[in-house]
Amino acid sequence: MSKIRTAVVGLNMGLDHAYAYKLAERSELRWVVDLDEEKAKKVAADLGCNYTTDWTTILDDIDAVSLCTPHHLHAPQSLTAIAAGKHVLLEKPLANSEEDCLNVIQAAEQNNVTLMLAFVVRFLPAIRKLKEAVDSGKYGKPISAQGWVEAFLTPAPGTWFSSKEKLGGGALFSHGCHYIDILLYLLGEPARVSHFGTRVGTDWMEGEGTSHGIIEFKSGALAHLVTSWGMRYKKTPARFQIHMTEGMLELDNSMWKVEAISKEGTETLYERPAEYPARRGQNVLFEIEHFLESIATGQRPETDGHEILKSHRTIWAMYNSQGTPVNL
Ligand SMILES: NC(=O)c1ccc[n+]([C@@H]2O[C@H](COP(=O)([O-])OP(=O)(O)OC[C@H]3O[C@@H](n4cnc5c(N)ncnc54)[C@H](O)[C@@H]3O)[C@@H](O)[C@H]2O)c1
């Protein structure tokens, strides 16, 4: 099959997409696009491709596009690309409302194009190993999972990501969505949720900058996820621990190492191999290769709209949950 002609729109997170397309054998990176012409020009020079500030003018020259733009643009830009018959790899989230999500999913199905959500964490080899270990039965059944996503964002009032409407919520929707997806991937269907968010420490954001969410799964297992953009001082602990009836699985903060503790002691189940060097685009390359393969084979991408809508719906249910006031 001839190479898939690709383009990337939005060159902050999208830079990693551009580098990954450059690395991927199935892709010919044709264009990089940003409203900031100087930025686009520099990236194009570094990667040996074309650049423009108006992505709608290049649609005839590409087969597939990564949209790596602010959240409120995801639905309208996806609909434009899909209507032109282009395959779309859309950065998370799918869209800021359920109605927009369903419109994009329906448009992709009607136009027979591949729509994949860029849930980069799902495709990391350590996460695949964690899933294999949970599903193996060797460590028994999941009881309780904890995840910590601790970051500090320089206060940026007035930007799209300080706006609750443009971001689609707060840190949980924007960043935590990766990890809610991972919890569903590992532990199955959720049954009930609850959530608290705070703006303390991130008052430049309209939505919550720090989130504590709890999920009860249909299996009876529980999960607790902390997501924050306000943790300036941190001694970041393990990203994930999954306590099982016969062991404990741990994903370290680099997202490249998985350990298991059981009656057999501590085993390293996965560690970064030399074949995956720390280079720009490497983390994103796993999802990009899945996207290109889905286009080439016509198979449904693992993180298609329907799959990702499940984790968005879980977050929206969390946002709608209300705690019980305490009277002392
Ligand atoms: N997977 C991850 O871990 C991860 C990390 C960061 C961001 N993201 C996602 O990537 C997307 C972008 O986030 P960001 O942090 O890069 O945002 P950003 O605001 O830092 O950068 C967006 C870029 O897109 C450009 N842009 C905006 N509108 C455009 C348009 N119409 N045409 C061309 N260029 C346009 C801007 O000039 C800017 O350079 C979001 O969906 C975000 O959630 C994902």
Image (cartoon, grey):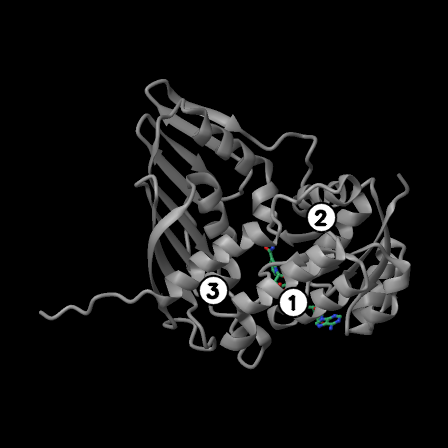
> Residue 36 at x, y = what percent?
77, 73
* Residue that appears at 62% across and 65% down: 103
Q: Where does the image place residue 243, in percent across and percent down from the top left?
A: 34, 35
96 lies left or right of 85: left
Q: Residue furthest left?
A: 328
Q: Residue at x 53, y 56 (%)?
A: 309
Give the tally of numbered discs.
3
Depth check: give the residue in front, 257 or 215: 215
- Quadrant in the picture for the C terminus: bottom left
Q: Give, as a three-letter code, the residue at label 2.
A: Gly
Give coordinates of residue 283: x percent, y percent: 65, 45
Q: Is residue 86 above or below residue 77?
A: above
The residue tagged 3 is: 171
Residue positioned 47% across, 77% down in the render: 204
Amino acid residing under circle 1: His
For the residue with label 1, is its CB less than 8 Å from the closest atom of ligand 1?
yes
Residue under pointer 2: 281
- Which label was assigned to residue 74? 1
